[in-house]
Image: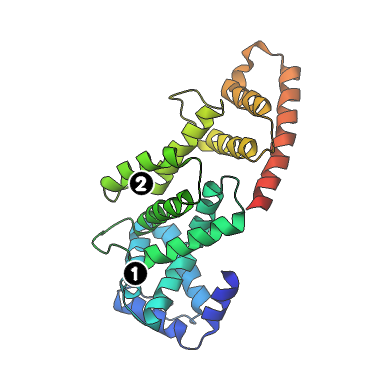
Amino acid sequence: MNAEWAVVCAEPGNTDLVLKWLREGGIHLWDGLTMGGLAEVLAELERRDRARGRAHSDRWLRVLLERAAGEGAEALLAARVVVQAMVPGAMRLTRRLQAGRDYDETGQVVVACLFQVVRRFPLRRTSGAAANLRMETLHLASRELRAEGTDYDVLLYPYLDEVLAGGPADDDPAETVWQNILGQRAVQAGLLRQGEVADGARGELIELLVWAVEAGRMDSDRARVIADEARAGAQRAGVSAVAWRKRRSRAMRQMRALAEQWAQAA
């Protein structure tokens, strides 16, 4: 993806064309400043997204999505810029949908689905462009992988159908769906209790433990011990401070190694 993006950025005229579309849509970049290349255009848009929020990303994404819905080389260019902007989200979806598969093979499915979603994005939706792109990509990619026998699709579909039926959401619907899926998988692995919600840092720990158990990198009993210790937290359930520090250090060593393996697998 990055190698192909470098070729797109180097193509003469691409930067000027994308900037022209953005200006026509009311998005003005580099007023009075030196204009950068296409990669810099995307970086500047993302910087403004962080500063101004979803309303800004909705505006410029919609400008490009409208172009991507057309035909010919210009539509493909607009779609490719949007796909590149969504690459970090596509990587997260790939990791989450991998479920024991080869990462690259899963990633190919996710990226192909993302491109389809960009090209046929429902322009009637007026807000949450990035969130809806992630949601539709998750929906389509999960169906593609389901045809190949993904074993947790029974968990995925009820949530997908419920969220999609509700139309665009204020929050990120793909993240909402994933948290429900993760919760079910964590309950099945004995890492969460039924009805228990893990968010923030503990939620990230649970997601890593679920991956480690499913990938065969950690024994399920050990994962449950770590999850229980995280639940107990500072209360320590009567364990002495010295013993608790030893437990925590041992768990931290294991989780640090797992985090490195997780990053390498992605």
Mark 1 closeness class: few <14, some 14–19, many ≥20 residues within 10 Å: many
Tag 1: amino acid: Leu
Q: Nearer the viewer, residue 220 or 230?
A: 220
Residue 29 visible, this angle: no
Mark 2 closeness class: few <14, some 14–19, many ≥20 residues within 10 Å: few
Q: Does 248 appear above or below 33?
A: above
Residue at x 43%, y 37% (from the top left corner)? 180
From this viewpoint, which residue is outermost toward the top? 238
On screen, residue 58 versus residue 246, left or right, reads left
Q: Quadrant of residue 208?
A: top right
Residue 14 in percent (x, y) is at 45, 83
On screen, residue 120 versus residue 2, left or right, reads left
The colour scheme used here is rainbow
Q: Disc 1 designates what residue?
A: 65
Earlier along the polypeptide chain: callout 1 or callout 2?
A: 1
Residue at x 51%, y 34% (from the top left corner)? 185
Residue 220 in percent (x, y) is at 65, 28
Residue 218 visible, this angle: yes
Question: Real-space Cα distance between discs 1 and 2?
Answer: 20 Å
Tag 2: amino acid: Asp
Q: Nearer the viewer, residue 146 or 184?
A: 146
Q: Disc 2 designates what residue?
A: 171
Residue at disc 1, secondary structure: helix
